Image: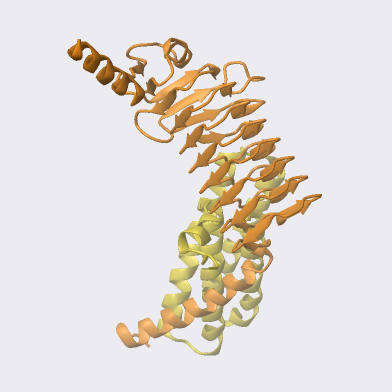
Chain colours: A yellow, B orange
Amino acid sequence: MLRILGLFDFFSIFSNIPTIFASIGLILATSSFISGLQLVRAASLAERKIHRFNGLTTFTLYISLAVLAFAYNGVRFWPLIGWVSGLCLFLLKIWIVRRKRRVYKYVSWMGATLILVWLFLVYIHIPV
Amino acid sequence: MRNIFLSILIFSSFSANGALAAVLRVPQDFKTVSGAVEAARPGDTVVVDEGVYRENVVINKGIALRAKKGPGSAVIQAAIKSDPAVKIIDASGVTVEGITATGSAASGIILVNASDCTLKDNHSVSNVYGISLYNSRGNTLTGNVTNSNENYGIYLERASNNTLKENTSNMNKDKGFFISYSNNNIVVRNNANMNTWNGMTVWSSHNNVFKENMTLRNTYGIVLSDSANNELVDNTTLPNVFIILPIFLVYLGILTYLIQKNFLRFVLGIK
C-alpha cells in the first residue's frame, strides 16, 4: 500500500525557521497587496485593517529574517546592502502612502515590488 | 550430589540468560566510555550518562552501549578526527543505543566485520559518513538519525543480509543511503530527504528490498546502477517541489485575504 505523505513529514521538509518566516511573509504580503489594490478603488475599513495588519506583520518578519541572517552568517557588505535596500522599499512605500493618499495607484507598483522582495526571500531561504 | 547438580544447572541457566551480566556506568564507575568498554565482558552493558565524551570508542566484543537518558543525551565526539567516533570491529551481538556520534572525518559509527549487531536510535551527525558497514552481515539498524554528514548518511560496502528500518538520513552533502556491492539487504520505512545528490543509491548490489521508503527533495530519489533483482515496493519519491513553492504560497495568500475579509465582515461586523 502506498505510504501516505504524513503532515509531519511534509512540514519536516520546511523545518527551518527562515523558510517558514519567508513563506508566511509571502502569504501575508500577497494578502496585503490585494487589500491595498482594493483600497485604491474604494476606501474600506475592513480592507485598511487587513492591509495594515498584514503589512505590519510582514515588516516584523522582514526585520526578524534580517536579524537571523546576520546572526547565522555575520554582517557582510552585499547582504547588508540587500537587506537595507529592502527596508528602504518598505519605508518608502509607507512614507508615500502617509504623505499623499492620492498616489495610491502608483503605490500599487511599490506593493508589487514588495511582493518581488518576498519572492526573492522565499527562493534564497529554500534549503539545499 | 543432586543439589550440586541442580546448582550447576541453575547457574548455567542464569549465565545463558545474561542474568549475571554487569552494568558499567559512565562516568560513575568509569570516567571514559572507552575505559568501560575495555573493562566490560561479553554480555555486559555500558550505560553512559548525559554529557560530551571526547574519545574514539572501539568495541570488539558482544556488549551493549546505551545512553542513560535516551537519544541525543550522550555525545561521543571523535578525539582523533581521522578515526570513527564509535568503531565495532570483529564482533558479534553488539548493541549501540541512543548514542550521538559526531566530529569524525571517517564515520560517526562504523561496523567492520561485524555480525548480528543492533544500532538503535543513535544520532550520527556532522561526520564524513554517518553510519558505515563494511563486510558486515545480519545487522539491524533501526531509528537512527544520520543527518548533515559530508558524504553519506548510511553507507554499506560489501555488507549483506542487513536490515535498515525507520532510519532518517537527511541533508547529507552527497547521498542519504549508499548501498555498494551489498546484497540481500532489507531497507524499509526510511527517510532520505533533502540530500544534495541522491536519496538512495544502489551500486552493483543485488536482491535487496526497498519498501515504503520516503525520498523527498533530493536531486534524484532512488538510483539503481549495475544492480539486478532488487525489489522496490511503495516508495515515495518527490522531486524538488520548491520550484512551485512560491506559486503555492501566493495562492495561499489569496485565500488568506478572502478569509481575513470575510472574518472581519461576518464575524466582527467591520465593512
Residue B2 lies, in percent from the top left, at: 19, 14
Q: Quadrant of residue B151?
A: top right
Residue A85 lies, in percent from the top left, at: 66, 55
Q: Which quarter shows the C terminus of chain B?
A: bottom left
Q: Which quarter shows the N terminus of chain B?
A: top left
Q: Residue at x 44, y 86 (%)?
A: A44
Q: Residue at x 42, y 14 (%)?
A: B41
Q: Residue furthest front?
A: B1
Q: Residue at x 58, y 56 (%)?
A: B213
Residue B261 lies, in percent from the top left, at: 42, 83
Q: Residue furthest left?
A: B3
Q: Is residue B94 above or below residue B166?
A: above
Q: Nearest the camera: B145 or A54?
A: B145
Residue B187 lies, in percent from the top left, at: 59, 49
Q: Nearest the camera: B222 or B231?
A: B231
Q: Is residue B260 above or below residue B70?
A: below
Q: Look at the image and tell me whether residue B269 can be seen.
A: no
